[in-house]
Image (cartoon, rainbow, N blue to C red):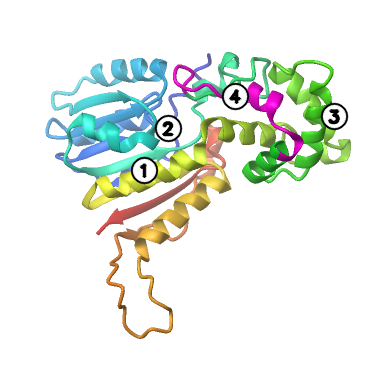
Amino acid sequence: MTSEYRHIPVLLAECLEQLALQTHHTFVDATLGFAGHSREVAKILGEEGTLIGIDQDEVALASSSATLESLSLGNAPRFELLRGNFGDLDELLVSAEVPGIDAILFDLGVSSVQIDTPSRGFTFKENGPLDMRMDPGKQTLTAQEIIETYNAADLTRIIRAYSDEKWASRIADFIVRARETERIETSEQLVEIIKAAIPASARRAGGHPAKRTFQALRIEVNSELTVLRQGLDAAIRWLNPGGRIAVISYHSLEDRIVKDTFASFANRCTCPPDLPVCMCGKQPVLDIVTRKPILPTPEEIERNPRARSAKLRVAVKR
C-alpha cells in the first residue's frame, strides 16, 4: 500500500467553495475514502454541524475515523461513519436519523489505496488476482468470473460501452481464445492478452493498452453506472432547499450521467416544446451551478497526476 496520493483530495479548494458550507450544516461525504475532503469540511462545520461519511472499505473507514477523531478542534462536528454503498443512500441516511442534508459530495472512481493494492486487482501496472470488487465482503462477481464466463459478444459489449475501446471485439476474441488453453487468473495474464490483441502501431499512443479494458471490467463488476444513478437520485431527494450536490467524475461515462441527471431535475417540464404555457405543472428541482465542469489547475495536476481527468459539477436544490 502506498500513501503517495491517498491523502491528496482532488479539487479540494473548489469543492469547499462550491459546497457553501455553514457551521450548522449536515454534510454527507458519499465516498469518504481516507477523509481528505471531510477533514477540511470538519474544520468549517463546527460543533453545531454534522458530518456523515460513507464508504464500502473497512480499512478506509477505520483510518478516517482515527483522522476525524484526532482533529484538535474544540468545536469539532458530530460525525458518523457508515459502511455501505452510496447506491443505498436512502437506507444509510435513514439509519443515521437525519431529516435532511445541506450538502453532499461524490468523489467517484477507485480510491488510490485500492489502485495501489495489487491484491485488490484494480491495477494493470502490478500483478495480482483479477478481483476488482469494491466490497469483497458483500459482492460475489469478480473480474475473473467475467473473463471466464462471458461470451465474446458480451465481453465486446462491456469493453466497448464502458471504455470506448476501439479494439473491443478483437480483445474479446483474444480472451476467449486464450481461456481455452489456460485459466486467466491474474492481471499480468490479462495485460499480455490485451497487448497481443491490440496492434503494435496502436499501442504506441493513448497510454497503457490495458487501461480501458480494466476500467470496463471494474465498472461491470461493481455496477458503477447503475449505482451512480441511484445515488444521485437519492441525494437530490434528501437535499434541503438551498442544499448543494457536488460530484467529481473521472471519465466521460460518469460525467455524462451527472450532467444528464442534473439537467433532468433542472428541466422537469414534459410539455410539447411548441406549447406556449406549461400545462404539466412539473417544477424544476435543481438549479445548475456549473454549466461547464470545473477542472483541476495545471499546478494541481503536477502535484497529483491522478487529478488529470477530474471534472466537478455542482447543483443547488430549489
How far apart are the alpha carbons under marks 3 and 1? Answer: 42 Å
Residues rendered magenta in the picture: 135-153
The earlier-in-sequence mark between 3 and 4 is: 4
The earlier-in-sequence mark between 3 and 1 is: 1
Q: Residue placed at 49% from the left, 18% from the top? A: 136
Name the disc covering residue 51, or none: none
Determine whether label 2 and label 1 are within 8 Å by CB.
Answer: yes
Tell whether 37 sits left or right of 182.
Answer: left
| Residue 142 drawn in magenta | yes
Q: Badge 3: few (under 14), some or many (20 or more) residues near its Cα, within 10 Å?
A: some
Q: Residue placed at 81% from the left, 34% from the top? A: 173
- Whether residue 94 is visible here, answered yes or no, is yes
Mark 3 or 2, closer to the camera: 3
How far apart are the alpha carbons under marks 4 and 2? Answer: 20 Å
How far apart are the alpha carbons under marks 3 and 2? Answer: 36 Å
- Vertical relation: 89 (above or below) 83: below
Q: Residue placed at 83% from the left, 41% from the top? A: 202
The earlier-in-sequence mark between 4 and 2 is: 2
Residue situated in front as seen by the camera: 143 or 108:
143
User: What residue is disc 1 on?
Assistant: 15
Which amino acid, by three-letter code, is at mark 2? Pro
User: What residue is disc 2 on?
Assistant: 9
